[in-house]
Amino acid sequence: MSGNDFQRYLHAKRTVDDRALDRRVLDRLAAALSDRARELSEPLRVLEVGAGVGTMPTRLLDRGVLPDRTRYVAVDERPENVAAARDYLRERGFDGNGNGTLRYDDDRTIDVELVVGDAFGIEGEYDLLIGQAFLDLVDLSWALPRLFDRLRSGGTFYFPITFDGGTIFVPELELDDRIAELYHRDMDERTRDGRSAGHSRTGRRLFSRVPEAGGEILAAGSSDWVVHPSYPADEAFFLRHILGTIEGALSGHQELDDAAFDAWVETRRGQIEREELTYVAHQLDVLGRV
């Protein structure tokens, strides 16, 4: 998949994420930030890691989660993602290239800084740390303490859309269970720079790993992706990307018959084109503080 296609995927999943996010956890986040903002004599400082194409700050503004006095730093390691975020935020009233003001309406604005960089190389202290669909791509035991180091005492963390071991397709096919098993195992065995690069059950692991890293969980809830016919917005493209990810991970796998797997992929592609496929991924939203 080309770079432009990946940014299109990130935009296409915005509507999927919007439906998935647990509203009770979001409400708890809004209350925590409101309390925090009243304690501060300066703007609330937010750091988002793996920020993608910039959909989170606008989402939090739309839902009334962010206080008016907010400085929002959005970090992503891919320059093309940051460029796409800049374009997207400009459509929403952002008036800068890398630094600027994002206007929600005439009365509500936040300051936003877009940064190309390593999530673990950002300096400073923040009141809120956000990592959406992020922790299931990193070594959790290594990452959590380093991320928590970026939070001020009493600071809040919000880890929505964290994958937790469920991949479901409807209508069911004979190979589904085996493909899901091998796909999750591929997630578990990924490495990057000599460390684990995620796990298929990261969501549930947060309940033990967060306290070990010095955090306290305040709220948690399910944030399953559910995409079913007829597909709104660009969600057919989203499904094609998910299918392509599975195909890339398992093509040529020694424990799968090549012809049977190819037939499974082609069947699923046809179901997307005919708007017959339903896809569910089980995920968790986790909110807490240090």
Image: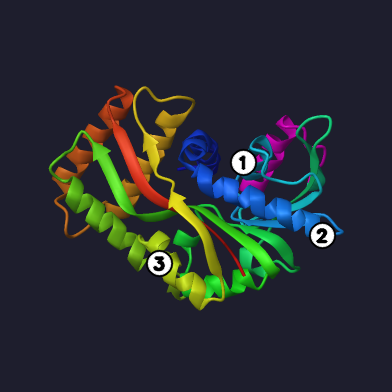
> Which scheme is used to colour this image of the protein?
rainbow
- The magenta stretch is 80-97
Q: Residues within 10 Å of mark 2 (few under 14, many from 20)?
A: few
As drawn, the label of residue 115 is: none
Where residue 55 sits: x, y (%)? 62, 41
- Residue appearing at x 60%, y 61% in the figure: 157
Q: Is 95 contained in the magenta span?
A: yes
Pair 1/3: label in front: 3
Where residue 225 sits: x, y (%)? 40, 41
Left or right? Give the position of 234 relative to 270: right
Q: Give the residue type at disc 2.
A: Leu
Left or right? Give the position of 162 relative to 99: left
Q: Main secondary structure of the magenta part?
A: helix
As drawn, the label of residue 205 is: 3
Q: Give the residue type at disc 3.
A: Arg
Disc 2 target residue: 40
Residue 74 in view: no
Label 3 element class: helix
For residue 60, above or below residue 107: below
First in residue order: circle 2 vs circle 1:
2
- Residue appearing at x 38%, y 65% in the figure: 190
Q: Quadrant of the N terminus?
A: top left
Give the Cα separation between the discs numbered 1 and 3: 26 Å
Label 2 element class: loop
Q: How crowded is mark 1: few (under 14 residues within 10 Å), some or many (20 or more)?
A: some
Give the Cα separation between the discs numbered 2 and 1: 26 Å
Left or right? Give the position of 198 relative to 53: left
For residue 188, above or below residue 3: below
Q: Is 248 contained in the magenta span?
A: no
Disc 1 target residue: 55
